Amino acid sequence: MLKVLARPVYRFYEYLLERDVKDGDIPTHIGVIMDGNRRAANMLNILPWEGHRLGAEKVNDLIEWCIGLGIGTVTLYAFSTENFRRTKEELDHLFDLFEEYLNNVAGDRRIHSNRVRVKAIGKIRLFPERVQRAVRRAEKATEGYSDFLLQLAMGYGGREEVLHAVRSIALEVKEGRLTPSDITEETISKRLYTKGAPDPQLIIRTSGEERISNFLLWQSAYSELYFCETYWPMFRRIDLLRAIRTYQRRERRFGR
């Protein structure tokens, strides 16, 4: 009974919060560390991979919320290089989930109606071939879109990304295509997995953990960080609005 009575109050609060947020500066790029799937599963007394499935379903909600707010790019920390150390049973379920989600992209009307481009970033070659095929299919199906960019960080590590860029630059210097004096911050940025995308203004981490865990290390130099207690499968639109409101209330100094 109390829940029924609280719903109109909750909706009205969400409406006021959205109105407040839309009057402010909306970030163009948000990064999300989707943490807490397994803890959510434990809380709900379900298997860990069922928690991951709930987390995957939340991604579609997030895309719609961000599009509605005018956010143009979202980068999701879907799977780190360290995650490959998990048990074979859990990895098999995760790979099944990646394959299913990515294969569904090609026929998802919401993806096409919103002109969402899907791009995987990271060491995709470390995944089973079936997942790699699903990645290629999703990227091919959306490569012509530019209204919204969804970057899925898979097999991703921020240090490895910077190392990849440095090795690329070193090779170009060795081959005489680049001189040391030519190297700038932009030189590195153009050789990252995220090349062409703006740096994130806001990074959100769910589950209450307060660290960035090797996510977008170079790109997040001036990002605002927001840590949310909610587990990722339980993340709500109101949590996103609160994160953006907090971002808007901070003074971004950019080192000045």
Image (spheres, rainbow, N blue to C red):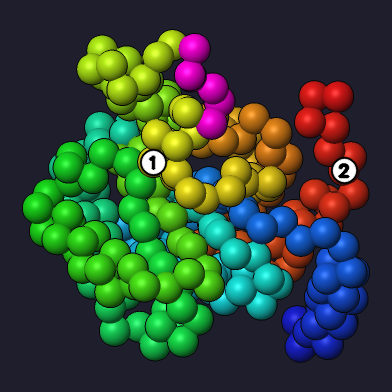
Mark 1, other Cα within 10 Å: few <14 / some 14–19 / many ≥20: many
Q: Is residue 72 above or below residue 180?
A: below
Q: Report the residue marked by disc 1.
A: 193
Q: Is residue 237 left or right of residue 134?
A: right
The magenta stretch spans which residues? 181-186
* In-front residue for pair 203/189: 189
Residue 153: x %, y % from top left: 39, 47
In the rendered image, the quadrant that contains the C terminus is: top right
Q: Secondary structure at mark 1?
A: loop
Main secondary structure found in the magenta portion:
helix
Q: Is residue 229 above or below residue 144?
A: above
Tag 1 or tag 2, which sits nearer the N-term? 1
Residue 16: x %, y % from top left: 89, 76
Residue located at (54% from left, 22% from top): 184
- Mark 1 is on which residue type? Tyr
* In-front residue for pair 157/9: 157
Residue 147: x %, y % from top left: 53, 72
Q: Report the residue marked by disc 2.
A: 250
